[in-house]
């Protein structure tokens, strides 16, 4: 058995062990506030994993993923409140809609390279934010209040405990990780890394660069929308400010960047560090000194980035993170 196959099998075994440990954590952690942080950490680990497919493996740095997150949230909320469609179908619908929109937006934007592409993703996300902010059918600036009709898995609503949301977030995180693990060794995974390193050389070897980028965008958008749909059910209220701001795009990208962009474990490691730190600083010093939590948050990111440019995952592996200049 070669070293590559051994590493992949080792990653799978490690993931199964960590998932089993995570499943047992709520048995010992009863504090609701801590459980809430754990739910958000798992959710952002999955979202960052989804972002990493496009931004890390394929090298297309997007800072507009809040658009897909918001689309997932609004699709689920609108279908449930307007037509009584169960959130599970809303999640699937939001994922499909987001994937299709990602393909439609990718057609013009993937012809851009470098910072031009990054700017385009920000602008498109801001346009989406403004559209929903003024769309009366979707509640405009007031948003949508999702009615809670008792604890139910069918309606994915729980008022007495956060544990069902925790376990769904855990499954979502595991699914996003497994999809990434599977794609990493697939034809698409090799294509994406080739496109990231040198798109011209990849195309000369037969890689269809444009189709590779479109495929990465569709998968990334689909998973991100699932996360948005979950978040809508988790908080039971959404508006453009709570699901479509630039902050969400950053919080999806930063864990992967900090943990190790273009790596399998980087988004998970980054989320485990950044999300609890974000929530704790916001809770304990965010109110007493407005912006102090953000200063601390940014300072930690800068220090770690300077110390480990390839991400924190480099501390646990001799194998360097995937490198390359975003195209």
Image (spheres, grey):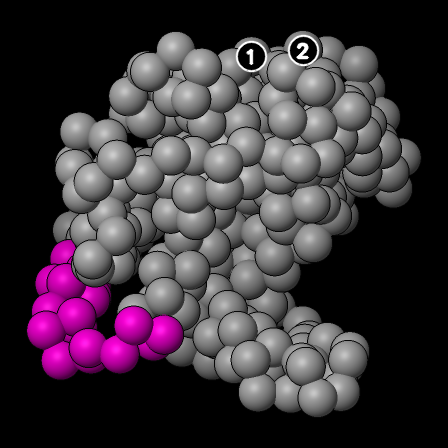
The answer for how far apart the CA atoms under marks 1 and 2 are is: 6 Å
The vertical placement of 227 against 173, above or below, is: above
Numbered range of the magenta stretch: 11-34
The vertical placement of 310 against 174, above or below, is: below
User: Foreground residue, 195 or 14?
Assistant: 14
The label shown at residue 136 is none
Q: Are marks 1 and 2 in contact (CB under 8 Å)?
A: yes
User: Foreground residue, 267 or 94?
Assistant: 94
The vertical placement of 286 against 186, above or below, is: below
Q: What SS does tag 2 mark?
A: helix
Q: Where is mark 1, residue-wise? A: 100
Residue 310 visible in this rendered orientation of the protein: yes
Question: Could you say where residue 87 lies in the image, as x and y percent from the top left?
Answer: 32, 26
Q: What SS does tag 1 mark?
A: helix
Quarter of the image holding residue 103?
Answer: top right
The label shown at residue 104 is 2
Question: Could you say where residue 169 lies in the image, as x and y percent from the top left?
Answer: 30, 50
Residue 21 part of the magenta-drawn span: yes
């Amino acid at each position: 058995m070669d070293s590559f196959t051994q590493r992949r099998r080792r990653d799978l075994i490690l993931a199964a062990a960590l998932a089993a440990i995570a499943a047992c954590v709520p048995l010992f952690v009863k504090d609701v506030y801590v459980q809430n942080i754990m739910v958000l950490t798992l959710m952002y680990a999955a979202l960052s994993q989804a972002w990493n497919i496009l931004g890390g493996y394929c090298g297309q740095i997007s800072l507009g993923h809040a658009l897909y997150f918001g689309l997932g949230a609004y699709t689920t909320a609108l279908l449930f409140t307007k037509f009584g469609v169960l959130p599970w179908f809303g999640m699937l619908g939001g994922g499909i809609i987001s994937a299709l929109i990602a393909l439609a937006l990718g057609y013009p934007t993937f012809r851009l390279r470098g910072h031009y592409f990054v700017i385009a993703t920000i602008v498109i996300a801001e346009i989406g934010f403004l559209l929903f902010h003024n769309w009366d059918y979707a509640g405009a600036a007031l948003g949508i209040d999702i009615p809670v009709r008792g604890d139910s898995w069918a309606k994915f609503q729980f008022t007495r405990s956060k544990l069902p949301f925790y376990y769904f977030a855990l499954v979502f995180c595991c699914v996003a990780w497994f999809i990434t693990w599977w794609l990493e060794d697939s034809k698409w995974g090799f294509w994406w890394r080739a496109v990231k390193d040198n798109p011209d050389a990849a195309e000369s070897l037969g890689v269809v660069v444009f189709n590779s980028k479109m495929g990465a965008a569709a998968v990334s958008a689909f998973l991100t929308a699932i996360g948005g749909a979950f978040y809508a059910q988790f908080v039971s209220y959404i508006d453009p400010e709570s699901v479509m701001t630039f902050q969400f795009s950053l919080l999806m990208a930063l864990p992967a960047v900090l943990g190790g962009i273009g790596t399998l474990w980087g988004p998970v490691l980054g989320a485990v560090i950044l999300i609890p730190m974000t929530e704790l600083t916001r809770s304990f010093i965010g109110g007493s000194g407005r912006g102090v939590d953000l200063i601390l948050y940014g300072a930690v990111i800068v220090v770690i980035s300077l110390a480990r440019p390839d991400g924190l995952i480099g501390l646990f592996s001799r194998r360097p993170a995937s490198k390359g200049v975003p195209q």
